[in-house]
Image (cartoon, helix red, strand yellow):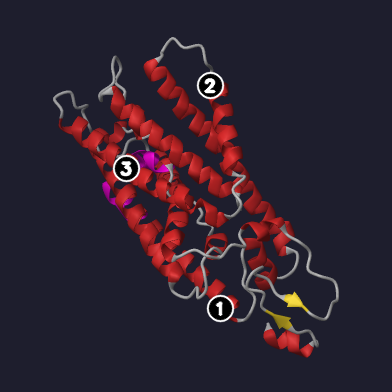
């Protein structure tokens, strides 16, 4: 990269504040970029990096892991959950090393689009990576208020079953909260919110694990079976479905944007942040997946919370559902706020 600049007579110097190279062969200033300005504040530590990574990956989708075990069985569920963790950790760390390498060359890349432009070439950022990342973030920003609205509606119905408020009203409330969070001045400003998100994800995962163990040991524990059901074709497609659920649970860590929040020197900080993040992932994913499948077997629902509601009455006290749904609601809003900033 530096050689090409030298041969063409163009001198590139690093701009540590804006995170992109300036071509001094042109007299016109670089075009302002609102996205760059947002991730411009590089003052974070590896702790902050861990908070951001955890919020971008760990979310309420982990409550579907017991259902994925019903499609994969004990061995397949644990195996694929472990393999997915190892593969994503390795790929995220490799991506971080690529970013560090280009930063040392004087071209600090702050977004996936910057990486696509500098590594793959012009056009890849605008016509492939940019639209793809936009669709992922757009889907999350739309889905966040929907999931949050359902949690808020459940809390409302729990204590006011005859209330007149409708689901769309709760979705609007969550949408407004998301809109307000999107006004924060920089990605670094989310660090306290993302720390809260980390704590809440661990807390509601622990609650789900405790609830599953309690129900599994109770006298009213449902009968449970762990053998895979259906024909050979059903089992095969079930395996694909289970793997896709686990892959979705690991989501997409927005490595460039998060690494851009780190203060110089960046070297080694991202690996520490990833270790913190994957410690939380191990503590939450395995606890929820294994305990939920153990308690309900092949009867585990698409979301494990649905199994806590019996046919005639809830299997756990109201305060349990209240706390769990509040924690999920707040954590989902933080996760959505992260996506609105990329």
Q: Quadrant of residue 68?
A: top left
- 3D distance between C-alphas at marks 3 and 1: 37 Å
Q: Residues within 10 Å of mark 2 (few under 14, many from 20)?
A: some
Query: Would you say residue 67 sits in the magenta stretch?
Result: yes
Badge 2 or badge 1: first in the primary sequence? 1
**3 or 1: mark nearer the eye:** 3
- 3D distance between C-alphas at marks 2 and 3: 26 Å
Is residue 213 placed above or below 165 in the rendered structure? below
Relative placement, left or right, of 12 versus 204 is right
Query: Residue 167 shows which numbered tag?
Result: 2
Residue 1 or 43: which is nearer the viewer?
43
The location of residue 263, given as percent across then percent down, is: 52, 69
The location of residue 314, given as percent across then percent down, is: 28, 21
Query: Residue 203 shows which numbered tag?
Result: 3
Residue of label 1: 101
- 3D distance between C-alphas at marks 2 and 1: 49 Å
Visible residue check, residue 263: yes
Relative placement, left or right, of 1 versus 45 is right
Element on which disc 2 rests? helix
Is residue 169 placed above or below 190 in the rendered structure? above
Badge 2 or badge 3: first in the primary sequence? 2
Visible residue check, residue 227: no
């Amino acid at each position: 990269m530096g050689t090409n600049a030298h041969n063409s007579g163009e001198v590139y110097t690093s701009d540590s504040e804006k995170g992109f190279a300036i071509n001094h062969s042109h007299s016109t200033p670089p075009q302002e970029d609102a996205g760059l300005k947002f991730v411009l504040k590089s003052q974070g530590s590896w702790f902050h990096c861990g908070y951001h990574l955890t919020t971008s990956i760990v979310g309420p989708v982990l409550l579907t892991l017991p259902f994925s075990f019903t499609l994969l069985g004990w061995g397949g569920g644990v195996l694929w959950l472990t393999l997915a963790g190892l593969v994503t950790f390795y790929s995220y760390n490799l991506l971080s090393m690529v970013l560090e390498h280009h930063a040392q060359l004087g071209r600090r890349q702050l977004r996936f689009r910057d990486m696509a432009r500098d590594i793959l070439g012009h056009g890849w950022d605008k016509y492939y990576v940019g639209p793809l990342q936009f669709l992922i973030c757009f889907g999350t920003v739309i889905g966040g208020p929907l999931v949050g609205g359902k949690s808020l509606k459940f809390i409302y119905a729990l204590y006011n079953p005859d209330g007149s408020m409708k689901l769309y009203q709760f979705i609007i409330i969550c949408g407004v909260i998301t809109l307000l969070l999107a006004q924060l001045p920089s990605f670094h400003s989310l660090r306290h919110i993302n720390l809260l998100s980390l704590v809440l994800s661990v807390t509601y995962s622990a609650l789900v694990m405790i609830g599953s163990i309690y129900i599994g040991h109770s006298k009213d524990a449902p009968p449970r079976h762990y053998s895979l059901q259906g024909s050979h074709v059903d089992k095969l497609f079930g395996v694909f479905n289970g793997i896709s659920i686990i892959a979705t649970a690991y989501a997409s860590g927005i490595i460039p944007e998060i690494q851009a929040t780190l203060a110089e020197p960046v070297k080694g900080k991202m690996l520490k942040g990833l270790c913190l993040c994957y410690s939380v992932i191990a503590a939450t994913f395995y606890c929820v997946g294994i305990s939920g499948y153990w308690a309900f077997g092949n009867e585990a629902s698409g979301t494990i919370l649905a199994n806590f509601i019996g046919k005639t009455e809830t299997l756990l006290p109201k305060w349990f559902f209240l706390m769990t749904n509040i924690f999920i609601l707040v954590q989902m809003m933080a996760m959505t706020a992260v996506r609105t900033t990329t």
